Image: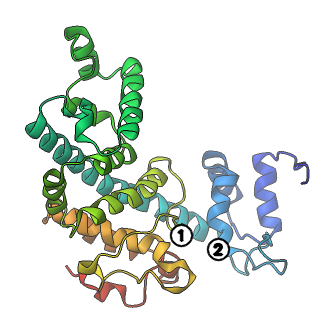
């Protein structure tokens, strides 16, 4: 293990270093402005595709390909920001719909505080942990609807399910859904989202959680390889990249966009989201589509047909 000994550089030194490595920028003050407002380290993820390949394995060369323009790197960064916003918009719609479906179905089936009833959940230990998490967050939550409950009710000690569910993240919500033991409730939700089985429904929401987190934390999205694989969905097989595709293609963004598009069409068939995604993808060179896992001729696949 080596000791880290790289000295910090001023914005002017950072700009000069990039130009010394071959980056072309006709307006140094513009480069310095973006280094100041975005950050050298954050931008470095976007100029990686523009670096010469290293002859020393996975280590970076840090020398730019000939004719690399700063504007090309900035355009990729802006594209990724717009992509994150668009994907987050869709996942928000999906997440809100899941909250509504699950909380309404459980409340109508077993009452306003059904989530507190351990017999409605498969794994008692998981239920205790999830309920304890809600209880801890309840004490510190400053939302007006939570404060209203604290000020007006003493029993039950926690708010009704339709209020509590609004405090859950997609990851937390997918965990509650998976632990719910009422099959008829899950089937209703499964049909609402156009999924063929309960197992696939649960697996889809579990796999989408890291995508949601990348967007929520403003991290690089466009060429990321995810760890959680999506399940095989027979209805979408003509649009999805096969799971056994080489170079982990099925773990890149394309397949997740296919599933998001399918969920969006299930909850809102008139949504313009797919059209806007296609328009955004048209703003970058097609060679970047491959790095996102897009197959050749992807626009002809059924999910993208207008």
Secondary structure beneath dot 1 equals loop
The residue at the far left in this view is 108
Instruction: Give the image location of residue 6, x and y in percent.
Output: 87, 50
Taking the spot 35% from the left edge, 38% from the top edge, the residue there is 124
Residue 223's disc number: 1
Which disc is residue 49 wearing? 2
288 over 218 or under it: above or below:
below
Q: Quadrant of the C terminus?
A: bottom left
* Residue 129 or residue 27, whichever sits in front: 129
Residue 262 lies, with reference to residue 301, above or below; the image says above
Looking at the picture, does residue 146 appear above or below residue 90?
above
Going 69% across and 53% down the picture, which residue do you hit? Answer: 41
**Side of 125 relative to 145 (left or right):** right
Instruction: Label 2: state its secondary structure.
Output: helix
Figure check: 44 above or below 173: below
Which x, y percent locates residue 301? Answer: 29, 86
Q: Quadrant of the N terminus?
A: bottom right
């Amino acid at each position: 293990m080596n000791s880290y000994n790289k000295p910090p550089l001023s914005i002017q030194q950072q700009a000069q270093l990039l130009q010394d490595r071959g980056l072309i920028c006709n307006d140094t003050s513009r480069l310095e402005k973006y280094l100041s407002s975005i950050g050298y380290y954050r931008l470095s993820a976007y100029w990686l595709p523009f670096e010469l390949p290293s002859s020393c394995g996975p280590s970076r060369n840090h020398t730019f390909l000939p004719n690399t323009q700063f504007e090309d790197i900035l355009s990729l960064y802006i594209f990724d920001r717009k992509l994150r916003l668009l994907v987050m918009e869709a996942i928000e719609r999906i997440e809100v719909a899941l909250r509504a479906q699950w909380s309404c179905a459980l409340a109508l089936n077993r009452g306003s505080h059904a989530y507190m009833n351990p017999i409605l959940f498969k794994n008692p230990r998981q239920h205790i942990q999830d309920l304890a998490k809600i209880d801890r967050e309840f004490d510190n939550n400053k939302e007006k609807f939570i404060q209203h409950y604290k000020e007006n009710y003493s029993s039950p000690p926690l708010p009704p399910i339709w209020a509590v569910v609004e405090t859950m993240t997609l990851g937390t919500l997918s965990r509650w859904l998976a632990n719910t033991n009422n099959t008829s409730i899950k089937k209703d939700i499964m049909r609402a989202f156009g999924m063929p089985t309960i197992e696939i429904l649960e697996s889809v929401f579990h796999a989408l959680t890291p995508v949601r987190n990348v967007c929520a934390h403003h991290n690089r999205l466009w060429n990321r390889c995810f760890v959680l694989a999506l399940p095989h969905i027979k209805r979408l097989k003509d649009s999805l990249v096969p799971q056994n595709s080489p170079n982990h293609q099925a773990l890149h963004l394309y397949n997740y966009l296919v599933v998001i598009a399918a969920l969006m069409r299930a909850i809102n068939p008139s949504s313009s989201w797919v059209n806007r995604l296609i328009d955004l993808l048209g703003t970058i060179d097609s060679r970047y589509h491959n790095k996102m896992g897009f197959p050749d001729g992807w626009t002809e696949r059924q999910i993208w047909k207008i």
